[in-house]
Image: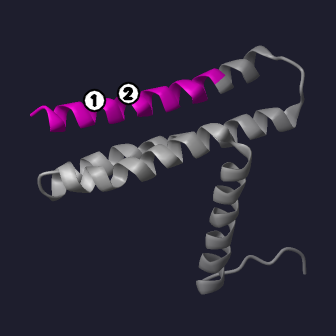
């Protein structure tokens, strides 16, 4: 019979479990993820307090969540590259550098959003 793909609620339950496992793995193994998650956790209540209206609150919170999302993607890229092997390769280095640059841009984005909203 082979591999049987779950559908409906079972697929949703499985996907949720995989997502929690990924979050736990990132928390356990990635210091950058822990730092950014703690930063976002600390700033989220401030975003809700400082935002004037739903749109500003959504932008402030969304910019924080984007940092965490991009860090998770970067962590996935790094894990896949590291799985390939420990030797240095130009493309592996480029992939890791680009992932790191994406996190940097997400951090810059959050900074710009916060500055524009708070200084307006």
Q: Nearer the viewer, residue 85 or 42?
A: 42
Q: Nearer the viewer, residue 107 or 28?
A: 28
Q: Is residue 93 magenta?
A: no
Q: Which residue is mark 1?
A: 112
Residue 69 in view: no
User: Residue 22: where, in percent of width, then height?
Assistant: 68, 57
Which image quadrant is residue 31 in?
top right
Which image quadrant is residue 71 in?
top right
Residue 94 in view: yes
The quarter of the rendered structure image containing the N terminus is bottom right
Helix, strand or loop status at disc 1:
helix
Give the residues drawn in magenta, as a range. 97-120
Residue at image coords 32%, 31%: 111
Check residue 108 in the rendering and tell me which mark sits there, or answer none. 2
For disc 2, the neighbor class at 10 Å (few under 14, some 14 to 19, many from 20) is some
Chief secondary structure of the magenta portion: helix
Residue at image coords 25%, 36%: 114
Q: Are marks 1 and 2 in contact (CB under 8 Å)?
A: yes
Helix, strand or loop status at disc 2:
helix
Q: Nearer the viewer, residue 20 or 33?
A: 33
Relative to 21, 35 lies left or right: left
């Amino acid at each position: 019979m082979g591999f049987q793909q779950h559908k409906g609620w079972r697929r949703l339950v499985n996907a949720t479990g995989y997502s929690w496992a990924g979050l736990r793995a990132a928390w356990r193994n990635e210091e950058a993820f822990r730092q950014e998650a703690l930063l976002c956790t600390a700033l989220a209540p401030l975003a809700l307090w400082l935002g004037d209206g739903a749109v500003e609150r959504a932008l402030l919170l969304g910019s924080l969540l984007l940092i965490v999302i991009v860090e998770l993607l970067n962590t996935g890229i790094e894990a896949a590259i590291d799985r390939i092997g420990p030797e240095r390769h130009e493309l592996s280095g480029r992939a890791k550098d680009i992932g790191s640059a994406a996190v940097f841009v997400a951090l810059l984005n959050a900074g710009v959003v916060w500055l524009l909203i708070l200084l307006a």
